[in-house]
């Protein structure tokens, strides 16, 4: 290798690009670009870990959502949390340009990342279907979406995804290579293009299409449900009609806004990465190397990880009840901390009471006697009123 060039070697942060095993000149990823890449990886990893831990804590502690909704959101947050943990392995390689974690972790991090990204898409699809059933079948949804069935759906999604991606783990798709005194963790889909092609075109892209169609179907269902509500409110008074319509419009705006954000984040984050992966499979890394710059490959790859913490804001932070539950939990934590910080006065023993009684104890006993006397006076006053009322009624 020439003195003015070096190898970009990365962990999970550079695995999905052909840049792992090609040579770049210093202008491609030197100085500012490498610093920006490292900062981006750190920010995404920290936000994904902190945001999803907070999300799981609030979802499991609060009771502001239905159980099926909580189960799917918790599974989504857990998969996004795993993405954040895996991204931690990319921080050191992005700084030192070396993969020090060995062959096993190279395979494991890439395999787990493939699994959790697909599980995230499936969980978003389950959330859309759950909302559609709740709106279209408000009476039957409790039977169709029972707690047991929702848990089984989540387990099936995880098991099928783990089994479907296991070939990539045992095959030579994720490997480490020794390149000029450094180890690189490389993704080579061209070694087994059939499995990668099946994963992208048969699983991931159809799920995205179904997710889009279900979102559109949900929007149409919401619109029709609102029309039915307006016809039912037609016979009511004008004031009641205006109030109900205002609540209806607010609910519609929330639902439409949520769906727009979901669809936008899903396509913006996943479509570029999937498109680039298809080019890897069909044309190989040489074509990508000739047509795409390192910065573009890096941006496409990390857009897929961007949704790992963006989903927290979409599904949780846009709900006012989430903030209420979070505020209650913070208040409980503060109150428990204050209780621990205040020293507890030990109880007085019989020996201490037999001796000299402290002034504070005398003061407390006086307050207790005064409160007892006030209670007795209140009771006697009430009894006097009852006697007077009964006497007046007898005289009449």
Image (tube, rainbow, N blue to C red):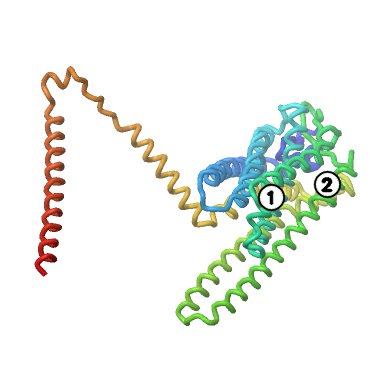
Splitting the image into 4 quarters, where does residue 392 fall? bottom left
Element under label 2? helix
Q: Relative to the observer, which residue lies in front, 234 or 8?
A: 234
Splitting the image into 4 quarters, where does residue 158 fall? top right
Q: Which mark is residue 161?
A: none
Q: Relative to the observer, which residue lies in front, 180 or 216?
A: 216
Which one is earlier in the sequence, the residue at label 2 or at label 1? 1
Q: Relative to the observer, which residue lies in front, 281 or 1?
A: 281
Q: Relative to the observer, which residue lies in front, 189 or 204?
A: 204
User: Measured from the top left, where is residue 18 in percent x and y?
Assistant: 81, 42
- Counting other residues with Cα less than 10 Å from the Cα at mark 2, is it few (<14), some (14-19), or many (20 or more)? some
User: Measured from the top left, where is residue 282 in percent x and y?
Assistant: 89, 49
User: Measured from the top left, where is residue 299 in percent x and y?
Assistant: 71, 49
Q: Is residue 311 above or below residue 7?
A: below
User: Measured from the top left, where is residue 193 in percent x and y?
Assistant: 89, 43
Residue pictured at 57% horizontal, 64% vertical: 254
Q: How far, Cα to Cα, is label 2 from label 1?
A: 17 Å
- Counting other residues with Cα less than 10 Å from the Cα at mark 1, is it few (<14), some (14-19), or many (20 or more)? many
Which residue is label 2 attached to?
199
Residue 350 appears in the figure: yes
Residue pictured at 80% horizontal, 28% vertical: 180
Q: How many marks?
A: 2
Q: Which mark is residue 123?
A: 1
Residue pictured at 21% horizontal, 20% vertical: 349
Element under label 1? helix
Quadrant containing the C terminus is bottom left
Query: Residue placed farthest to the top in the image?
Result: 351
Residue pictured at 80% horizontal, 40% vertical: 165
- Give the left or right position of residue 224, taking residue 108 as reference: left
Quadrant containing the N terminus is top right
Residue 36 appears in the figure: no
């Amino acid at each position: 290798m020439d003195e003015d060039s070096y190898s970009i070697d990365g962990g999970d942060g550079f695995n999905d690009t052909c840049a792992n095993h090609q040579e770049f000149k210093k202008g491609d990823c030197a100085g500012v670009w490498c610093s920006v890449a490292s900062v981006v990886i750190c920010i995404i990893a920290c936000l994904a870990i902190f945001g999803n831990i907070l999300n799981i804590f609030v979802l499991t502690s609060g009771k502001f959502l239905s159980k099926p909704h909580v189960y799917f959101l918790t599974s989504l947050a857990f998969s996004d949390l795993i993405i954040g943990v895996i991204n931690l392995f990319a921080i050191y390689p992005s700084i030192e340009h070396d993969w020090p974690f060995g062959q096993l972790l190279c395979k494991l991090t890439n395999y787990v990342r493939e699994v959790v990204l697909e599980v995230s898409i499936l969980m978003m699809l389950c959330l859309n279907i759950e909302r559609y059933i709740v709106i279209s079948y408000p009476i039957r949804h409790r039977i169709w979406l029972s707690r047991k069935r929702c848990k089984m759906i989540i387990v099936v999604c995880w098991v099928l995804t783990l089994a479907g991606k296991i070939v990539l783990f045992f095959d030579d798709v994720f490997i480490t290579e020794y390149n000029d005194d450094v180890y690189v963790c490389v993704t080579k889909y061209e070694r087994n293009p059939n499995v990668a092609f099946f994963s992208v075109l048969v699983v991931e892209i159809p799920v995205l299409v179904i997710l889009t169609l279900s979102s559109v179907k949900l929007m149409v269902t919401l619109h029709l449900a609102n029309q039915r509500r307006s016809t039912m409110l037609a016979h009511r008074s004008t004031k009641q009609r205006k109030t109900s319509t205002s609540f209806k419009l607010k609910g519609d705006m929330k639902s439409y806004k949520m769906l727009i954000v979901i669809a936008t984040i899903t396509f913006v984050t996943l479509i570029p990465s999937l498109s680039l992966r298809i080019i890897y499979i069909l044309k190989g890394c040489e074509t990508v190397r000739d047509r795409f710059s390192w910065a573009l490959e890096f941006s496409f790859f990390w857009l897929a990880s961007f949704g790992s913490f963006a989903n927290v804001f979409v599904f949780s932070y846009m709900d006012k009840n989430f903030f209420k539950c979070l505020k209650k939990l913070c208040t409980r934590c503060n109150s428990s901390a204050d209780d621990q910080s205040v020293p507890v006065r030990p109880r007085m023993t019989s020996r201490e009471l037999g001796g000299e009684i402290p002034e504070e104890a005398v003061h407390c006993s006086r307050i207790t006697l005064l409160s007892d006397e006030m209670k007795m006076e209140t009771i006697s006053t009430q009894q006097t009123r009852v006697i007077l009322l009964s006497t007046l009624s007898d005289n009449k």
